[in-house]
Image (tube, rainbow, N blue to C red):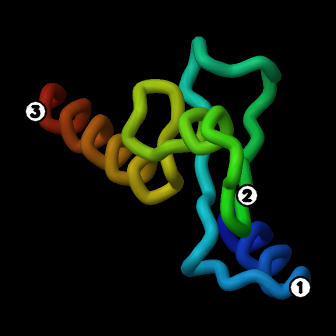
Amino acid sequence: MHQKAIDLLKERGHEPEASKLGFHVPPFHSIDHLHLHVLAGEMKSGFRKLKYESGRMWFKDLHQLQTDLDKQLRNQQGSRL
């Protein structure tokens, strides 16, 4: 998903480094299937800025999610020893 998002951003003339990739955290979602948000350009709406702000309990950027999942996996593996 990550690579497809990067390819899409480049195809459409956006800088991947200046874009945001992330997921809404349940139960703060309105669509019941996994989907990656790919956000490019400036968000002018205050609501949208808040809705997709990293570090909030309802949205995690891709890096933050990967870090959390890695930590959970290490904890699970450690508890089995």
Query: Disc 1 marks which amino acid?
Result: Glu
| Closer-to-camera residue (63/12) | 12
Disc 2: which residue: 38
In the structure shown, which secondary structural element does the residue marked by tag 1 occupy?
Answer: helix
Is residue 52 shown above or below 42? Answer: above
**Could you tell me which residue is drawn at 74 percent across and 35 percent down?**
34
Q: Which mark is residue 11?
A: 1
Q: Is residue 28 left or right of residue 54?
A: right
Q: Is residue 60 left or right of residue 6?
A: left
Question: Is residue 12 visible to the viewer in this orientation of the structure?
Answer: yes
Q: Residues within 10 Å of mark 3 (few under 14, many from 20)?
A: few
Q: Residues within 10 Å of mark 2 (few under 14, many from 20)?
A: some
Determine contact: label 1, label 3, CB under 8 Å.
no
Tell me which corner region of the image, top left, top right, bottom left or bottom right, holds residue 75.
Answer: top left
Is residue 81 shown above or below 4? Answer: above
Q: Earlier in the sequence, mark 1 or mark 3?
A: 1
Marks 1 and 3, how far apart at CA: 47 Å
Query: Disc 2 marks which amino acid?
Result: Val
Q: Earlier in the sequence, mark 1 or mark 2?
A: 1
Marks 2 and 3, how far apart at CA: 39 Å
Q: Quadrant of the N terminus?
A: bottom right
Query: Disc 3 marks which amino acid?
Result: Leu
Q: Is residue 16 left or right of residue 71?
A: right
Q: Residue furthest right?
A: 12
The percent coordinates of residue 12 (x first, y second) are 89, 81
The percent coordinates of residue 60 (x first, y second) are 48, 42
Q: Which mark is residue 81?
A: 3
Q: Residue furthest top?
A: 27
In the structure shown, which secondary structural element does the residue marked by tag 3 occupy?
Answer: loop
**Could you tell me which residue is drawn at 76 percent across and 41 percent down?**
35
Marks 1 and 2, how far apart at CA: 13 Å
Question: Is residue 23 visible to the viewer in this orientation of the structure?
Answer: no
